[in-house]
Amino acid sequence: MLPSAKSLSELIARLWRRYGFERVRLMHVCGTHEHTITYHGLRALMPEGLELIPGPGCPVCVTPARVIDEAIRLCLEGVTIYTYGDMYRVPGTQRSLADARREGCRAVVVYGFLDAARLARENRGEAVFLGVGFETTAPTTAAPIARGSVPDNLYVLPSYRLTAPGLNHALRLHRSRGLGIDGVIAPGHVSAIIGAEAWRYLPREYGLPVVVSGFEPEDVLLSIAILLRMIGERRPGLVNEYSRVVKPLGNRAAWRTVMEVYRIVDAYWRGIGVLPESGLLFREKYRAHDAIERYGLDISPSNRELHPACRCGEVSLGLAYPTDCPLFMKACRPGRPIGPCMVSSEGACSIWARYGGWITAASIGGRRGPGRRQRRHRQPG
Ligand code: SF4
């Protein structure tokens, strides 16, 4: 059983004093961690000077606009598009699948790929599943494809991204700007697939302590305490706080299947750029399922990936907080999003908007970020 949040926040305060910290910057790489931190107001429990920075943990936020544009084009040409609720609402260069649906395209929100396969089997017309996510979701398309249980009329438009290249890019950028990251909270869901040991390179190559963390507020607080101890003792290592779910080598069968169906390629991240070996595309053997091949799709970066004022790329890398964006809760709101970070439930802008982060814009000079108590002041539009 996990210790209580009260005892963990007291432990964090004691460690802060014991090691005489003035400033510590911890990055996490998971929208669900940001949700836990913001929803439960964990930043308000942190000592002054301890920053919890949301890193690249939102796959929907970094899905290229052109992928959405091409899905819309196919949809308007009569191909059914199956996708997750978040992707349905994210704008491409000009509009979202939800907008296009009003023009007659058939875009259908599904819970997952098996749902799409069932519907495609019933409906028989040509259909495309928009495959978006990190290592956690890639097995959900890879496994049925490898098993041969996908109907012939269903193709996959893969836009999967890998977490480590995104994190490494963020770490290097922070370091180059003189604001290095002191420790990493690794994503529990992704680690359940790739294994806790996948993060061993962080202490070895970056000299950074890393804790694989669960998603309860107590998990995150305990992970922060473990990181502070490793930083204070100058002994960077890997700790698996989420061992009740994450195994050292993860789900090897699932990841083997992903690597059988997909190959790792350089990939474009919306608002960020091309990151080496950070995406997945079909291997030759499985090209019959590839929507890019079937329809000759162009998924190269467009010259209008984001609204000129949208800072979603910087927000995704932890280089800016949502409240640093001039459009936050003004022109850009959950009900009227301008950038993808305001649409996805894993996007920092959306999470801060929904749970009160915008109220504290002036009060995060100490970089403490939002706390849940602000919710009662006003609900976002
Ligand atoms: S608030 Fe909106 S416009 Fe600003 S960075 Fe976030 S998504 Fe982009």
Image (cartoon, rainbow, N blue to C red):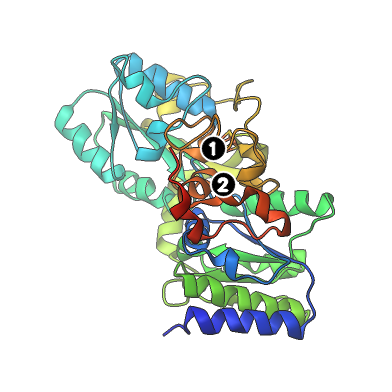
* In the foreground, 369 or 295: 369
Residue under label 2: 358
| CB within 8 Å, label 1 to label 2 | yes
Name the spot of residue 167 as percent of width and height, x first. 65, 53
Badge 1 crowding class, 10 Å Cα cut-off, few under 14, some 14 to 19, many 20 or more, is: many
Question: Residue extending furthest front?
Answer: 377
Please tell me whether mark 2 sits on a helix, a strand or a loop.
helix
Question: Going by the image, does 212 lie left or right of 364?
Answer: left
**Residue 323 against residue 274 in the figure, above or below:** below
**Whether the residue under disc 1 has CB within 8 Å of ligand 1:** yes
Q: In which quarter of the image is residue 245?
A: bottom left
Quadrant of the image where one finds ligand 1 = top right
Q: In this rendering, does residue 124 appear at all?
A: yes
Q: Earlier along the polypeptide chain: callout 1 or callout 2? A: 1
Name the spot of residue 272 as percent of width and height, x first. 66, 37
Q: What residue type is labelled 1?
A: Met
Name the spot of residue 39 as percent of width and height, x first. 47, 59
* In the foreground, 306 or 78: 306
Question: Residue extending furthest left?
Answer: 122
Please tell me whether mark 1 sits on a helix, a strand or a loop.
loop
Q: Residue at horizontal 66%, vertical 54%?
A: 363
**Residue 375 against residue 293 in the figure, above or below:** below
**Residue 295 against residue 352 in the figure, above or below:** above
**Residue 20 against residue 180 in the figure, above or below:** below
Badge 2 crowding class, 10 Å Cα cut-off, few under 14, some 14 to 19, many 20 or more, is: many
Question: Going by the image, does 64 lie left or right of 238?
Answer: left
Q: What residue type is labelled 2?
A: Trp
Residue 329 — which label? 1
Question: Going by the image, does 43 lie left or right of 116?
Answer: right
Gap in Å between the C-alphas at discs 1 and 2? Answer: 7 Å
Q: Residue at horizontal 51%, vertical 67%?
A: 195
